[in-house]
Amino acid sequence: MSHQVLIVMGSDSDYPVLTPCLDLLDTFDIQYQVRICSAHRSPQMAADLAVQAESAGFSVIIAAAGLAAHLPGVLAAWTTLPVIGVPIESGPLAGQDALYAVVQMPPGVPVATVGINGSVNAAILAAQIIGVHHDDIRRQLHQYKATLRQSVSDRQKKIDQILNDRQVKTKQSLS
Ligand code: RP5
């Protein structure tokens, strides 16, 4: 299989939000293919992409869209693959419109929704889904969790230092 994750974005204007997702998939050595497709501007292509995704060898679909973001839901309607929806911040409602459109799917057609512009979480969730059947990906996810733990302990050291400096300054000003 040459590609495992199908990434669909409603417009090329969504691309900057998706780059951290691509970076993370690269880090996890997960293959992906990126397609621009709109539920409203190219509805037939959206249906075709979703219908063919499984036989094309994809395990997960990540779909990102802004405004009236029907793309993830439309793809989910046409496939049994898990679809992760990324609401994109765009337009006067700043992504809240997209969030509601993506998350409020009717019973029977779920879309796993991440936060507005949450493309990093979309990549991690995709890796977790693929990792169920791939030990190497699961190992990388364990490593990723270890980096998260390390970053918390680094932040604790930083704040300890700031608090210590503050105490010293307060004592000096009182003496
Ligand atoms: C949505 O409309 C796209 O996903 C994008 O977030 C938004 C604006 O699209 P463009 O007008 O920039 O192509 O369909």
Image (spheres, grey):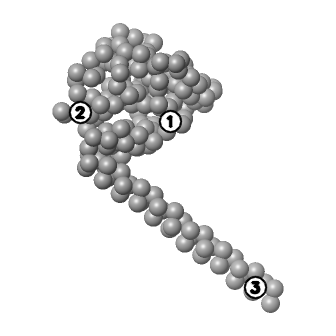
169 on left or right of 31: right
Residue 83: give x, y in percent of width and height. Answer: 40, 27
* Residue lying furthest bottom: 175
Asked if ligand 1 lies within 8 A of label 1, the reply is no
Residue 31 picture location, percent across and down: 25, 38
Disc 3 residue lies near ligand 1 with CB under 8 A? no
Residue 72 appearing in the image: yes
| Ligand 1 neighbours mark 2 (CB distance < 8 Å) | no
- As measured in the structure, the alpha-carbon distance from the residue carrying label 1 to the one carrying label 3 is 47 Å
Residue 122: image x %, image y %? 43, 38
Residue 103 falls in which quadrant of the image? Answer: top right
Of residues 78 and 115, the one nearer the viewer is: 78
| Residue pointed to by mark 2 | 3
Q: How many marks?
A: 3
| Marks 1,3: beta carbons within 8 A | no
Q: Residue furthest top?
A: 44
Identify the element where label 3 is drawn. Answer: helix
Task: Between label 1 and label 3, give the one nearer the viewer.
Answer: 1
Residue at (51% x, 62% y) in the render: 152
Res 114 label:
1
Name which residue type carries label 2.
His
Q: In which quarter of the image is the C terminus?
A: bottom right
Q: Residue furthest left?
A: 1
* Amino acid at dot 1: Val
